Image (cartoon, grey):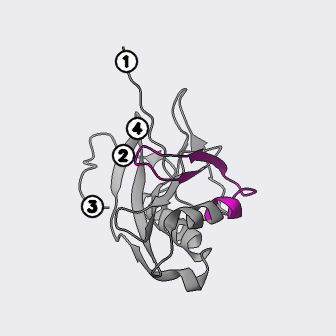
Amino acid sequence: MVLLLGLAGCGSDSSAVPAHPISTEGESPAVEDLTWQEAKARTQAMELEIADWLPLDLVAGVDQMPDGILIQCGDSAVNWHGATTVTLTEGTEPDPVVRELEAKYRDSRFDIKVRDPAPAGHYEVQLRSPDTAEIYFIKRGVEPGTIRIASGSDCFPWPEGEYMGGKF
């Protein structure tokens, strides 16, 4: 038996439309002229846009990871993955806040997938681009009283033989 896992990526501002997508059958389309720096910037901006939807009285802090990683999403394409953690004010439970974010994005450009419970036993919302690999996972964070927004960008071309390990 073969198990095939697909990783989806994310990362553009909510009004951006990919220019010049390229794809082969069975792969997420790559945005032909997108660089990893642009993919990272778009994805991180969207992470912060999601966090900005939260009422200020529920947020004690927002910590965006400065670096991410690249994951292959086709024979010659990769996408950038990162995360932002939102620390909630004392006594605020994450799951109801995640449900509020789901409601805010219900009529957006994203398709929504809910896992209730997700494998870790909490409520998880996925904002998925219907056209690209862009994706955001919104769920209870590892630390108590936090929400984690994990992300993956649109796919973009990666030069054959170019090292894709390390921090991006």
Q: CA distance from mark 1 to mark 4?
A: 22 Å
Residue 144, percent from left and from top: 37, 68
In this rendering, the label closer to the viewer, 2 or 4: 2
In this rendering, the label closer to the viewer, 1 or 4: 1
Q: Can you tell which mark lies on residue 76?
A: 4
Pick the residue in front: 62 or 147. 147
Pick the residue in front: 33 or 86. 86
Which residue is the site of mark 2? 71
**Which amino acid, by three-letter code, is at mark 1?**
Val
| Magenta-drawn segment | 101-126
Of all residues, the one furthest to the right in this rendering is 107
User: Do labels 2 and 4 touch, CB within 8 Å?
Assistant: no
Q: Can you tell which mark lies on residue 167?
A: 3
User: Which of the two discs, 1 and 4, labels the residue nearer the N terminus?
Assistant: 1
- Is residue 113 shown above or below 50? above
Q: Can you tell which mark lies on residue 2?
A: 1
User: Do labels 4 and 3 touch, CB within 8 Å?
Assistant: no
Q: Can you tell which mark lies on residue 68?
A: none
Is 41 situated left or right of 107 in this image? left
